[in-house]
Image: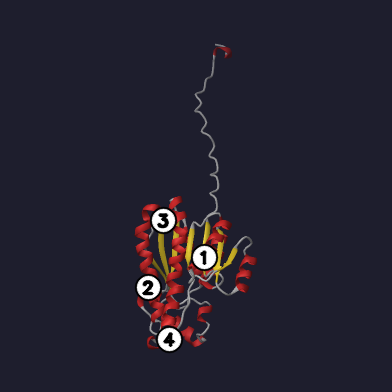
Amino acid sequence: MHEEDFELTFDLEPLEPAPQPKAAAPARGVLISGGDRGIGAAAARAFYEAGYRVAVLYHTNAQAAAALEASLPGCIALQCDVASRAACESAFTAAEIMLGHVDVLVCNAGIAQQKLFTDITPAEWQHMLDVNLTGAFHLCQLALPGMIRRKWGRILTVSSMWGQTGGSCEVHYSAAKAGLIGMTKALAREEGPSGITVNCVAPGVIDTDMMAAFTPGDKAALAEETPVGRLGSAQEVARALLFLAGEEAGYITGQVFGVNGGLVI
């Protein structure tokens, strides 16, 4: 038998097409109130580093806002008194134009005051509610129509452990922060069918400039009282906000996440 009498045949499986890289999803836009310092500024940096288009609202600290813009090229800082509906409307419109649209809203703007309940004036009570609670109401109402239209959105409120437990000498602050928790839960039920999640982060003792009045001894005592033995950082709160804004958190809504080192369990 000769070589030419043989014919070699091979059954070749058709080659599967090589996997193609997924097209990069367009960057989402995030608007952060009270974004010029503390938790808000840390959140701005965290979202920016994760690829979001970022806009922040600030009230009076133009120098801090300008420094944030300089450190995060492309980040937009807009002046806004969140207690004013007209100011919120103007700032939100500008943010929406600059970002394209607001996919994630972080309601972080807030003020604090330590005072005996019997010494709180009606004006102080109202101002605390206007900034800490009604400001979130304004921004949520402005953000929701676009989120509902796009069938996707994330709303994140920043409350406080005092909104969960109540704080002595901070009754008006505690009441406003508790109101944020109630709004978060109710809004989550209402907007879930539209693809929008609403969650709350309730920080504990976080070492920011809102603690400027505390002495080193005060801070040491608070750290000792905290089960993990230290104060929290703004960056730790920011990481919780970033997670809750992501696709992987789509089944989480109406929840309150304590970033408090175990002070509230």
Residue annotated with mark 1: 32
Tag 4: residue type?
A: Lys
Residues marked 2 and 4 touching at CB (< 8 Å): no
Residue annotated with mark 3: 196
Tag 1: residue type?
A: Ile
Callout 2 secondary element? helix
Question: Is 126 on the left or on the right of 102, as rendered?
Answer: left
From where the camera sits, is residue 262 visible?
no
For the view shown, which residue lies furthest in the front direction? 86
Residue annotated with mark 4: 115
Per the rendering, the mark at residue 178 is 2
- Percent position (x, y) of residue 243? 46, 60
**In the rendered structure, which disc, 2 or 4, sits on the residue that comes first in sequence?**
4
- Percent position (x, y) of residue 154? 45, 58
Q: Few, some or many C-alpha atoms within 10 Å of disc 1 (few <14, some 14-19, many ≥20)?
A: many
Spatial CA distance of label 1 from label 2 is: 20 Å
- At 54% from the left edge and 19% from the top edge, which residue is drawn? 8
